Image: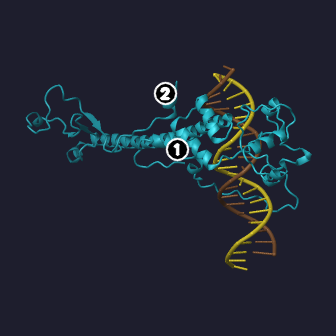
Chain colours: A cyan, B brown, C yellow
Amino acid sequence: MIELPHTTTPPIPLSFLYNPPPPHALSSKPDPPPPVKPSCNVTFPSPDPNSSSYRAETRSTLRGIDVNRLPSTADCEEEAGVSSPNSTISSISGKRSERDGINGEEHEMERASSRGISDEEDGETSRKKLRLSKDQAAILEESFKEHNTLNPKQKMALAKQLGLRPRQVEVWFQNRRARTKLKQTEVDCEFLKRCCENLTEENRRLQKEVQDLRALKLSPQFYMHMTPPTTLTMCPSCERVAAPPTASSAVDASPHTHIGPSHHRPIPMNPWAPAAPITRGPTPFDVNRRRS
DNA sequence: TGTCTAATTAATATTACTTCA
DNA sequence: CTTGAAGTAATATTAATTAGA
């Protein structure tokens, strides 16, 4: 969560919002929720089929099924020749995999070798989700800073540069946009929350002022001793507090006296209002509006 | 037909906690 | 009692998939 200053709400720096640091840098882990203590601390001697380690261990070989090997035949690799480092079909039951079919092992080896994947990585446990290297991620980030969408030409070039499939580059950009949007939504949410708090507070104060004024109206004996009204007026031209009109002000020759049509109607000035007007950066709504 | 968003899945990493020598 | 290693579970991150516009 991004902390916004409590007092005023500064404009949200677009450079951050739309060109945030890499996700891994951004995602400083929020304070984790208090750990949920297991209701029972008994450890079982046999592996728990639900445990992640058990799943991870057995995922690829369990029941004699090599999940790296997919049943069907043809390969649907979009761009032959450009292959991913160790990306594989991510889901056994993935419809795309079923639909498209992969000559699993053979193709996997081919892919791996084309990227110089070591035998170690390409062994039985090679059904690994691709993790982009730091360099790859950095290049993608850089590219995203320049343009958060890619045309086919850019996509191909980037894929070639990174040694990835164009589809992977495309997916990365999609996910990156989604992440950016999520971050922006969080920031907007915070902003609106602050606005709401400010307005609530202002409302409370105004209500109190009304109450005070009503009380004064009912108690004219105190009228003369009252403190100056807090709802003053301000000259919009010079942004100075204007004295309430009196008989003497008509002959007042002070330099603040304005004459003529340029002197507009004074606007109320709320002494409790935040010193700086609330400004904000564009929200996703604005962004969407721009897009459409 | 291709690309987008949104929602979702699943692999992997990280973290917190427990147990035990 | 303290400490460090090892194991586990919960959670976070993110690549990939899917559906629909």
Q: Say whether residue B18 is left or right of residue A15.
A: right
Q: Which residue is mark 2?
A: A290
Picture coordinates of residue A11, whole percent (x, y)? 42, 41
Q: Which residue is mark 1?
A: A20
Mark 2 neighbour density, 10 Å: few (under 14) some (14–19) many (20 or more)? few
Quarter residue A275 falls in: top left
Q: Secondary structure at mark 1?
A: loop
Q: Let me know if residue A185 appears in the view.
A: no
Picture coordinates of residue A220, whole percent (x, y)? 23, 42
Residue A268 higher or lower than A113, as above or below: above
Mark 1 neighbour density, 10 Å: few (under 14) some (14–19) many (20 or more)? some
| Furthest residue in direction right, as rendered | A64
Q: Let me know if residue A254 appears in the view.
A: yes
Residue type at tag 1: Pro
- Looking at marks 2 and 1 on the same chain, the residue that comes earlier in the sequence is marked by 1
Q: Chain of mark 1?
A: A
Q: Which is more toward the observer, A191 or A119?
A: A119
Q: Chain of mark 2?
A: A
Asked if badges 2 and 1 are on one and the same chain, I answer yes
Picture coordinates of residue A263, whole percent (x, y)? 19, 29
Q: Residue at x 43, y 38 (%)?
A: A280
Q: Residue at x 59, y 55 (%)?
A: A31
Q: Nearer the viewer, mark 2 or mark 1?
A: 1
Q: Say whether residue A192 is left or right of residue B6.
A: left
Q: Residue at x 28, y 43 (%)?
A: A230
Q: Which mark is residue A170?
A: none
Q: CA distance from mark 2 to mark 1?
A: 20 Å
